[in-house]
């Protein structure tokens, strides 16, 4: 049976805020209670099941169920697009199945837990952040309540847990009203019932981790250690102001430092929940081959780590890497990973581990408590979610035919055009062009039969509540900024989305730092001189050097504009009944293909 978790802070404790807001001021909501920090020990909820082959352990062993999710991102309702699965009617082809939603996921979780009283429900980060409006409007409090109601026990932090800064993450853990927007939900927010783990996130002033690094759970007296951490590349993915004073240590080094500490406490089975992942081939339960950061991380881990629950890449896989079981459960709550462990009673070591990814299917009955919770938040949020903003002639995306080899996408260009329109007037900053980071555009826009677009659609695409900022740059600084799209050794390419009237040509055969063809930058058909002063609209994330666009931090500030999502809404509204169409992908032109 389940006993309380022993939660430990790894040798490495808290600091500082970053606000979300803006949307909340658009809706009048009810107030609620005050700060009530949660206990440092998270209660241990029920568990998950795994393949029946080891469901019943021998007398000298203990069978344990581990349920796992990752990258939920506040998707309380089934996400658009569902999940891609093999088509049973057409071998070799796939079909999209509606899947997910917390009402049905709670039912799946409860069914798996019922298979074995020895269970634990864990997550590999990004439970919140980049969320749909039903969650984001309430600073993801609705999601945290939903997962607590399901009995989630432990979660590693992900990079999106730091979107609004450390202080906001700590408020999500401990409870209390938002410092700027107050209490907006239907009930008092008491904080997460589950415990966040952040072994590799270090407060540089204290040398301590900002949250506990690991927890110990006992199953029939046999202890199991759970280490939680995020990817070391988190600073490249969140606003620098939100993580000032923090460092993110190497993933494998962090785990290996903690393994002996757990061993000294008699823990000989260790599970790692890590917000970093890989890119597999095959189906949701296959792993004929896998690439990506998780492979090298696992190979560097202490051999006493037997199970790795991963995430971040939004992929589903069930792998063996270096002899260890490595799992990931897609994204947005479409899957629950059911893992069976067999523990040796005498030695406390893991002798077997198997897993299966369970689809949260549309025919699954809904959990009544989850329905009531969602309804209570929807009554407040639905008028804003359903508010019509304009019309769309076709779906717009970031993928497939909507994406160009030069780096542009139809959705990204639409956002950039909306940014420019909102700041072009002299009284609004006099912007001449706009640049948007690709990661700031979360998704595309669906097309409805009546062509209608809602505020909820726009917010799904732009969920980060970034303010627009007009800055002044020289032509040479603009060129330097474009060169920063390519990282050293081509480790990453983060193409900026470009507004109408601006274009340039680039060649990947040229060395990094000089890929933009000389003289190719043009504004409204005219070449841009190196010393020419240009006013550029960006978002607040880029202004502080997000995605390593350092040149933006040196640009001269002109003025702050509206939130990005509100600028896009104004763009749609300015067109009246005109249907927005995809623009031609000819702004960032790649010449070597």
Image: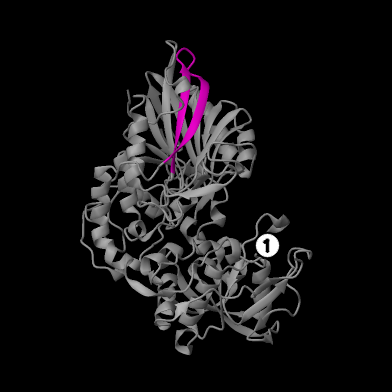
Side (left or right) of 530 relative to 431: right
Q: Toward the viewer: 337 or 11?
A: 337
Q: Quadrant of residue 295?
A: top right
Instruction: Identify the main secondary structure in magenta.
Output: strand
Whether residue 582 appears in this view of the structure is yes
Q: Is residue 260 above or below residue 149?
A: above
Please, which colouring scheme is shown?
A: one colour
* Quarter that holds the C terminus: bottom right
Quarter the N terminus occupies: top left
Residue 415: x and y in percent read 50, 72
Viewer-proximal residue among 38 and 108: 108
Residue 252 lies in what quarter of the image?
A: top right
Is residue 184 in view? no
Q: Residue at x 75, y 70 (%)?
A: 591
Q: Residues within 10 Å of mark 1 (few under 14, many from 20)?
A: some
Q: Identify the image quadrant of residue 251.
A: top right
Q: Residue at x 68, y 62 (%)?
A: 486
Does the segment drawn in magenta span residue 451?
no
Vertical position of residue 408 compared to residue 32: above or below: below
Looking at the rendering, the stretch of residues picked out in magenta corresponds to 335-359
Q: Is 475 positioned to the left or the right of 573 in the image?
A: right
Q: Where residue 520 appears, x then y in whole percent? A: 72, 79
Q: Is residue 363 left or right of residue 475?
A: left
Q: Is residue 28 left or right of residue 566?
A: left
The secondary structure type at the circle numbered 1 is loop
> Relative to the observer, which residue lies in front, 300 or 551?
300
Q: Which residue is mark 1?
A: 486
Residue 350 is inside the magenta segment: yes
Identity of the residue drawn at 68% across and 68% down: 483
**Residue 142 on image: x %, y %:** 31, 52
């Amino acid at each position: 049976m389940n006993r309380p978790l022993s939660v430990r802070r790894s040798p490495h404790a808290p600091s500082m805020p970053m606000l979300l807001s803006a949307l909340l001021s658009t809706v009048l909501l009810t107030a609620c209670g005050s700060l009530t920090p949660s206990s440092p020990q998270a209660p241990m909820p029920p568990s998950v099941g795994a393949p029946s082959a080891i469901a019943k352990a021998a007398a000298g062993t203990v069978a344990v169920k581990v349920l796992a999710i990752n990258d939920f991102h506040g998707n309380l309702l089934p996400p658009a697009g569902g999940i891609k699965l093999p088509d049973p009617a057409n071998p070799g082809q796939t079909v999209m199945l509606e899947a997910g939603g917390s009402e049905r996921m709670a039912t799946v979780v409860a069914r798996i837990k019922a298979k074995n009283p020895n269970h634990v429900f864990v997550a590999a980060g990004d439970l919140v952040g980049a969320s749909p409006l039903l969650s984001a409007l309430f600073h993801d409090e609705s999601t945290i309540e939903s997962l607590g109601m399901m009995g989630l026990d432990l979660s590693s932090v992900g990079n999106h847990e730091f979107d609004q800064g450390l202080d906001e993450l700590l408020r999500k853990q401990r409870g209390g009203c938002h410092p700027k927007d107050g209490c907006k939900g239907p009930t008092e927010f008491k904080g997460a019932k589950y415990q966040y783990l952040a072994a590799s996130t270090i407060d540089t002033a204290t040398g301590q981790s900002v949250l506990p690094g690991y927890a110990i759970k006992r199953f029939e007296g046999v202890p199991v250690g759970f280490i939680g951490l995020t990817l070391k590349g988190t600073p490249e993915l969140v606003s620098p102001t939100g993580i000032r004073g923090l460092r993110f240590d190497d993933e494998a080094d962090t785990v290996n430092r903690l393994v002996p500490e757990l061993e000294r406490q008699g823990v000989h089975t260790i599970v790692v929940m890590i917000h970093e992942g890989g890119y597999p081939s095959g189906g949701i339960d296959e792993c004929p081959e896998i690439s990506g950061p998780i492979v090298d991380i696992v190979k560097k881990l202490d051999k006493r780590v037997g199970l790795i629950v991963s995430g971040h890449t939004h992929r589903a896989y069930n792998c063996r890497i270096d002899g260890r079981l490595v799992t990931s459960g897609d994204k947005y709550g479409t899957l629950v990973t059911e893992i069976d462990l067999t523990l040796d009673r005498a030695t406390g070591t893991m002798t077997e581990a198997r897993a299966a990814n369970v689809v949260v299917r549309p025919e699954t009955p809904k959990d009544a408590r989850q329905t009531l919770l969602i309804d209570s938040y929807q009554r407040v949020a639905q008028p804003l979610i359903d508010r019509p903003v304009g019309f769309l002639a076709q779906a717009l995306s970031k993928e497939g035919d909507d994406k160009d080899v030069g780096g542009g996408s139809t959705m990204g260009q639409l956002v950039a055009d909306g940014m420019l329109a909102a700041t072009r007037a002299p009284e609004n900053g006099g912007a001449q062009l706009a640049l948007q980071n690709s990661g700031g555009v979360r998704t595309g826009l669906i097309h409805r039969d009546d062509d209608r677009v809602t505020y909820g659609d726009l917010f799904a695409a732009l969920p980060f509540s970034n303010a627009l900022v007009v800055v002044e740059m020289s032509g040479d600084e603009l060129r330097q900024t474009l060169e920063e799209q390519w990282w050293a050794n081509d480790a990453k390419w983060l193409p900026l989305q470009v507004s109408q009237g601006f274009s340039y040509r680039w060649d990947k055969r040229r060395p990094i730092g000089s890929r933009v063809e000389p003289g190719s930058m043009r504004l409204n058909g005219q070449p841009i001189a190196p010393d020419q002063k240009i006013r550029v609209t960006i978002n607040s994330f880029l202004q502080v050097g997000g995605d390593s666009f350092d040149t933006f931090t040196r640009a001269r500030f002109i003025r702050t504009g509206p939130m990005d999502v509100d600028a896009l809404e104004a763009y749609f509204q300015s067109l009246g009944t005109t249907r927005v169409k995809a623009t031609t992908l000819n702004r960032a032109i790649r010449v070597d293909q």
